Image (tube, rainbow, N blue to C red):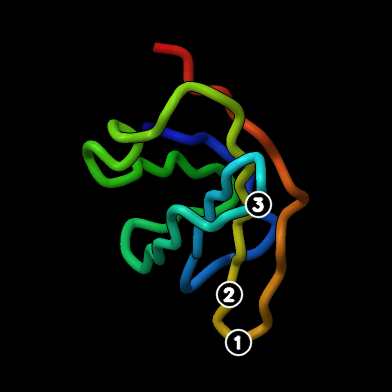
């Protein structure tokens, strides 16, 4: 799975958290290398969504800047359709 986003801050770390429709956390991954500003294409680990059932999933992205300040994205959604 690949996600393209505009990053609001020059991040030193990005955390991607994925939840089910019932808001059960299923993925929590941190990315610290290959971060670009302001446009970024994040490739999740190969096969991370292979075992997901069909349905709606929500995700939040947390950005930590070089000063340690954490910024959260709005809750967004994606659909798995096999």
Mark 2 and mark 3: Cα distance apart in space? 23 Å
Q: Residue at x 65, y 39 (%)?
A: 21
The N terminus appears in which quarter of the rendering?
A: top left
* Residue farthest to the right, as pictured: 74
* Residue farthest to the left, as pictured: 46
Whole-percent x, y for residue 22 in the image: 66, 46
Dot 1, crowdedness within 10 Å: few (<14), some or many (≥20)? few
Judged from the image, the secondary structure of the residue bearing numbered disc 3 is loop
Does residue 48 lie above or below 50 as drawn? below
* Residue farthest to the top, as pictured: 82
How many tags in the picture? Answer: 3
* Residue farthest to the front, as pictured: 22
Judged from the image, the secondary structure of the residue bearing numbered disc 2 is strand
Q: Nearer the viewer, mark 1 or mark 3?
A: 3
In terms of sequence position, does the residue under pointer 1 or pointer 3 come before the other? 3
Look at mark 1 in the image and give the residue it sits on.
Answer: 68
Q: Residue at x 70, y 56 (%)?
A: 8
**Residue 23 shows which numbered tag?**
3
Dot 2, crowdedness within 10 Å: few (<14), some or many (≥20)? some
Would you say the residues marked 2 and 1 are in contact, meaning their CB atoms lie under 8 Å apart?
Answer: yes
Judged from the image, the secondary structure of the residue bearing numbered disc 1 is loop
Q: Residue at x 39, y 11 (%)?
A: 82
In terms of sequence position, does the residue under pointer 2 or pointer 3 come before the other? 3
Whole-percent x, y for residue 61 in the image: 60, 56
Look at mark 2 in the image and give the residue it sits on.
Answer: 64
Whole-percent x, y for residue 62 in the image: 61, 64
Mark 2 and mark 1: Cα distance apart in space? 6 Å
Mark 1 and mark 3: Cα distance apart in space? 27 Å
Q: Residue at x 40, y 62 (%)?
A: 29
- The residue closer to the viewer here, 19 or 39, is 19
């Amino acid at each position: 799975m690949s996600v393209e986003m505009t990053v609001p801050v020059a991040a030193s770390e990005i955390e991607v958290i994925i939840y089910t429709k019932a808001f059960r956390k299923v993925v929590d991954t941190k990315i610290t290398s290959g971060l670009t500003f302001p446009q970024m294409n994040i490739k999740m680990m190969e096969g991370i969504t292979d075992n997901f059932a069909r349905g709606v999933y929500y995700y939040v992205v947390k950005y930590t800047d070089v000063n340690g300040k954490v910024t959260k994205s709005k809750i967004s959604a994606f659909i798995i359709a096999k």
